[in-house]
Image (tube, coloured by chain):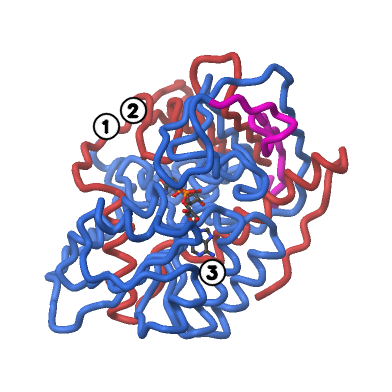
Chain colours: A blue, B red
Amino acid sequence: MAGSILDRFKEAVEESKEITTDKKIRIGIIGTGWIAEAHVANYLKCPDVEIVAAADLIPGKAEKFCKANGIEGVRLYPDHKSLIDNEQLDAVSVCTYNKTHAECTIYALEHGVNVLLEKPMCVTLEEAVAICKAEKASGKILSIGFQPRFDENMKMIRKIVQSGELGQIYYIQTGGGRRRGIPTPYGTSFIEEKTAGLGALADIGCYSLDMVLNAIGYPKPLSVSGYTSAFSAPIRITTRVIPNTPRSSPLTISPQRSSASRTTSCSTSAFPGP
Amino acid sequence: MLDFRISWAMNLDTPGDTIILGTKGGLRVPSTECWNGSIGGPLKIYKTVAGEEVEMEIPEKNDDTDNFYKKIRLFVDAVKEGGKAPVPSSQILYNQAIIDGIAKSARLGKEITLEIPEI
Ligand SMILES: NC(=O)c1ccc[n+]([C@@H]2O[C@H](COP(=O)([O-])OP(=O)(O)OC[C@H]3O[C@@H](n4cnc5c(N)ncnc54)[C@H](O)[C@@H]3O)[C@@H](O)[C@H]2O)c1
């Protein structure tokens, strides 16, 4: 009984393919900060990939990054444009802070380069539309860096909904938040307006939304009602200090200066359905 | 209807459960921060079977392959084979529309209609 019910949640098993190495995929890394480490570490596990170039706006940062992450012979550039203009690439990883996601991604696509773009896609809807248009015009591949998509437990949520076992979905509650979890791994690029553009909403909110929207097949959202708050007491944040980060530790950020550093966002968004 | 809350600093100790309600059953995803795929316990389905209220627990899977590796590997495969994007922009466009909509609606202090152009 239980077996037959569970069987309905099964999807075709992904075949594990043998990796051919006759053609190497040439990769460039744009933005050599925190998340770029995870990209490089995993590209290095791919025998058919060659990381040939890296770029960062902060002088000396890309070089230090390459040394620290064990990649050699990589050509270095001061921004995304010079990297794309001077290299013959199959793809780039866009690992910059949110505010430059759109310009880096669009420039790469317009120059015929496939893109793996970190989440969130960007900051505004207008940027997202421009990115999608550039992708369509280019005929290239653009994938967004939502790694929970590949997690078996997360996939199960979608499988359950798609199995029909729940009937038609009419209400979802998701999200949550952290008790104290303002991300300042290597500096303040997550929390400053000029780099992040948005606060917790863009940082972790996009994941909860993706988990449930993917489960129900990403229907087109119709309307949104949102509320944000940033309460007053200054928060003490300890940053891990690395050279080239123009701030020292510890650091006090008041919500007024940071991009909604303690934002709680509530939203409802209506979907067609019962 | 989707109800959503997110915060970096709130006076509460867990994110709270995700709840998906359907006409024939409900699903509880125990408290999750999502980004690393971890969940606070097995998924549970709530239904009525032959007039009885029942709960089904979905066994948790021990997935030992790294999600960050899969993100990279599946992208590389798509590039090599001219395949489809593992996480397509056509979907994430709607994710971004909601995020942007929340920010705009909060600024305006009222509900807004989303206008998402066809690409
Ligand atoms: N998938 C995940 O789990 C995950 C985790 C952390 C961060 N992220 C995302 O990754 C992105 C980067 O986060 P981070 O923590 O690595 O930030 P970071 O500040 O450590 O690194 C970003 C780097 O990009 C560089 N940069 C910005 N614009 C550039 C440009 N035009 N050309 C070249 N370099 C440029 C900056 O100088 C900086 O060094 C964010 O959008 C974040 O949301 C994803």
Q: Which residue is mark 3?
A: A104
Residue A130 on image: x %, y %: 65, 72
Measure the C-alpha gap from mark 2 to mark 3: 40 Å
Residue B16 visible in the picture: no
Residue depth check, mark 1 versus mark 3: number of the one nearer the observer: 3
Verify CB contact (< 8 Å) between mark 2 and mark 1: yes
Residue B42: give its label: 2
Residue B59: give its label: 1
Is residue A266 inside the magenta stretch?
Answer: yes
Q: How many marks?
A: 3
Magenta span: A251-274
Marked residue chain, label 2? B
Tag 1 or tag 2, which sits nearer the N-term?
2
Marked residue chain, label 1? B
In this rendered view, identify the residue nearer to me: A164 or B32: B32
Residue at image coords 57%, 85% = A137
A237 relative to A227, above or below = above
Residue A261: give its label: none
In this rendered view, identify the residue nearer to me: A110 or B51: A110
